[in-house]
Image: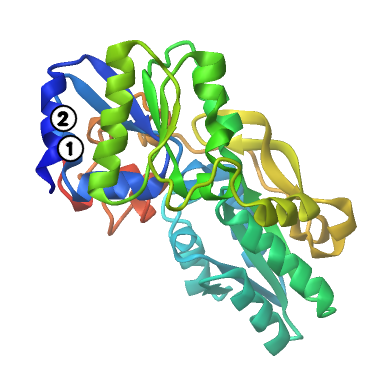
Amino acid sequence: MPSEVLEKLRALGPMHVKLMEVCGTHTMEIAKAGIRSLLPEGVELLSGPGCPVCVTPAEVIDTVLALAMEKDMLLTSYGDMIRVPGSRPGDSLQRRRALGADVRVVYSPIDAIELAERYPEKQVVFLGVGFETTAPGTAAAVLTARERGLKNFTVWSMLKTVEPALRALLKLPDFQIDGFLCPGHVATVIGAEGFRFLPGEFGLPAVVGGFEAEEILTAVYWLLRQLRDGEPRLQNAYPRAVAPRGNPLAQQVMAQCFTPRYDRWRGLGEIENSGLGLRSEFADFDAERRFPITVGSETAPTACRCGEVICGRIRPQECPLFGVRCTPEDPVGPCMVSSEGACAAAEKYQEI
């Protein structure tokens, strides 16, 4: 670890502040590199709603589980989603696959399109999970499917956008965060300016950070220096990948295929304009329209506190199930399942 950034951090001295990272990749690297142990005394770094699998609520998972059991269905998803439990402990796409459902892991939505071409007798549904980072690729797949005239390919959109979630967090009466380490991957699409509202409207420091340990520490140092000087602003500590206005082509393809809508978030409830639904002109590729599924809305009581972890109210270790009843091998909540989950990161790298 380069000593220059560490020396600058130590020179700041003790500070009683809370920062939040809003990216699952940041969460993993922070735990892996032991970054929390390197911060000045009194500086707390909490994880926010930066894991798309983690913020998907149990009732949405229940709907997907029912969809997987439909006749002639071939459900495709990224690997993390396969093990996320629904409202009933132990019930997941992995379990449904063991019961006979055709559920397959893919590495991109284009893989799902190829499956649709290979199995014309199947209805191939791609579970579109992610934030602005994965939305352009999902949109491109929809356009590709239309161009190829596929009749058996659809997308079940669980795509979400970051800004509305951060605004919802900031409106919570007990939310106390002094600055944000903003997600570099999302910023490559929407641009660093997509986080201008944090200092502009809420007076909070915001720094877009890269993903190497030194880059994260640099971003944290910039946040702490802003707080020390009392000058909250937006800074881009990841200029090699993030432009001020982002990627216009990616934004264009997203806007062509998706429209903002109400969406449900674990821990945050319904948030206006926080989800991305397919536009009406792409209804033929919208799995929600083609396969209307109704499941019960009641969620079984559980001691899992993933919702509070996502909102930065508690650290993973404060959940009574952490590392005891909830483990990577037998997860109760999504934060222990996902490769970007705060609980999985804390358990894997034995953070204390």
- As drawn, which residue projects farthest toward the bottom? 118
On screen, residue 276 versus residue 303, left or right, reads right
Q: Is residue 143 above or below residue 351?
A: below
Closer to us: 247 or 140:
247
Q: Tell me the amino acid under the disc marked 2.
A: Lys
Q: Which residue bears the numbered disc 1? A: 5
Residue 66 makes an appearance in the image: no
Position of residue 158 measured from the top left corner of the image (x, y, whole percent): 63, 50
Element marked by disc 2: helix
Q: Quadrant of residue 72?
A: bottom right
Residue 341: image tag = none
Whole-angstrom CA distance, mark 2 to mark 1, is 5 Å
Does residue 204 lie above or below 328 as drawn? above
Residue appearing at x 19%, y 15% in the figure:
15
Which residue is more in the foreground, 71 or 24?
24
Pointer 2: residues within 10 angstroms few (<14), some, or many (20+)?
Answer: some
Residue that appears at 56% across and 37% down: 162
Q: According to the image, label 2 marks what residue?
A: 8
Residue 265 position in % (x across, y down): 56, 36
Mark 2 vs 1: CB contact within 8 A? yes
Q: Is residue 269 above or below residue 144?
A: above
Type of amino acid under label 1:
Val
Residue 136 versus residue 167 in the image, above or below:
below
Judge whether residue 122 can be spotted in this image. Answer: yes
